[in-house]
Amino acid sequence: MTERKKTVYMSFSTDLIHGGHTTIIQKAAELGELTIGMLTDEVVANYRRFPVLNYEERVKLLESIKGVAKVIPQKTLSYKENLRMLKPDFVVHGDNWVRGFQKSIREEVKQTLLEYGGELVEFPYSENEEYQKLELSQREQLAMPDVRRTRLRKLLEMKPLVSVIEAHSGITGLIAEKTTVLKGGETKQFDAMWCSSLCDSTSKGKPDIELLDMSKRLQTIDEIMDVTTKPIIVDADTGGLTEHFVYNIKTLERMGVSAVIIEDKTGLKKNSLFGTDVEQTQDSIENFCAKIKSGKAALKTKDFFLIARIESLILEKGMDDALKRAFAYVEAGATGIMIHSRKKDPEEIFEFCERFRRKDSTTPLVVVPSSFNSVTEEEFAKRGVNIVIYANQLTRSGFPAMQKVAESILTNERAKEADDMCMSIKEILTLIPEDY
Ligand code: SPV
Ligand code: MG
């Protein structure tokens, strides 16, 4: 009787094959018939960075390597589901995962292998400067305007909900780019960044009244783009004069921004969270539709989103007015709708989403839950929302921390008492990676 050929399993996420990969694949294939579990795009984007090659392309790449018998999807960072299904004799991995966040995944693999007597085989991981340079060049690809711009659309196709955090400087951009948490065995990152008019103005000590002109706003966007790769949604206030907006939207598109949001207000714009406490004027449907049409006509690509923001609930003009405007703006060419509210209770947002979705099941819906902040992303997704923007939380957390430290130094006439509130000198020196 011939002995059954042993089976081997490895997981891959890479869109870049180098000698380190082929070496370990060869070693794995020597142990038996090798199946690769390819991480899906959504998992890779949450765990490392957006893949330059999509899932299908990455599968083809791996299938073409000698020694690979089969490539199947791995839909989570956890190997459990695939291991229970395939029961491979061996799981192969580099020994680098004994440390860092992959440690818990490794532990789970070992536990799962115990269930049926499988074995974990680890080969020494090859730290190689050349490989790191290759990875860096993939990252740089993601920052190129054409590549960055298209990714909001890809994310919307890929995920039930795209989560976005504000950035108003290079360093807040890096926080948006790099912050990762491990939750329930999965990693999570923000998908994109919001260049908020409020936070950009606040960081420059100015009120949020369209006082920063477009060149100043573009400078901030460029500063963020310089050190990040994630897609960017720009808050362009009212869009200004239509005659100016048609130029500015083109500039944003060319820079690699993925979306612009303009709000249907006119005259001196004030921040929406003031609501009716200050004088604010809503634009007419006709004027705003004309602005949308002109903006759309100026665009050169199909990737760029022009999102119309409705201020009817903020200005207490009622739900029917909000819905009427939403449908009119989509008809005029808006490729997304943002509905805003400053109520703590999310009911009016939910009602809008429900009634909008009854007639329109595809146009992306955007919310900014600064006030209705108890709603979870899962709940928003169920209600038909596609993009959630955390519009000001980094600003609102950063400045009070600085104020506290300033007060402590003034009070104590030295910095010792403030030290526990500060990042260590070592950390601050190494915060900005050399690769940027
Ligand atoms: C911003 O972040 O600048 C916004 C959202 O426009 S809000 O402040 O809620 O109006
Ligand atoms: Mg704003």
Image (cartoon, grey):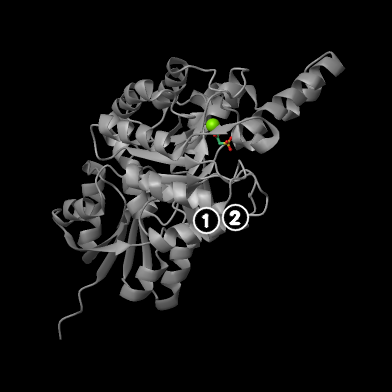
Judged left or right of residue 147, residue 343 is: right
Name the element at disc 1.
helix
Say if 383 sits above or below 206 in the image: below
* Residue 402 can be seen in this image: yes
Q: How many marks?
A: 2
Please give the label number shown on residue 274.
none
- Write the residue at 39% across / 47% down: 328
Q: Are marks 2 and 1 in contact (CB under 8 Å)?
A: yes
**Looking at this view, is 2 or 13 the one in front?**
13
In the image: residue 429, left or right of residue 83 = right
Disc 1 residue crowd, few under 14, some 14–19, many 20+, Cα 10 Å? many
Q: Is residue 179 above or below residue 40?
A: above
Ligand 1 sits in which quadrant? top right
Q: Which residue is mark 2?
A: 348
Quadrant assignment, res 141: top left
Spot the residue most to the bottom: 1
Q: Quadrant of the C terminus?
A: top left
Can residue 230 be seen at all in this image of the molecule?
A: no
The image's mark for residue 352 is 1
At x 16%, y 58%, the residue is 67
Q: Amino acid at mark 1?
A: Phe
Residue at figure coordinates x 38%, y 74% from the top left: 84
Q: Quadrant of the N terminus?
A: bottom left
The residue nearer to you, when weighing 135 against 385, is 385
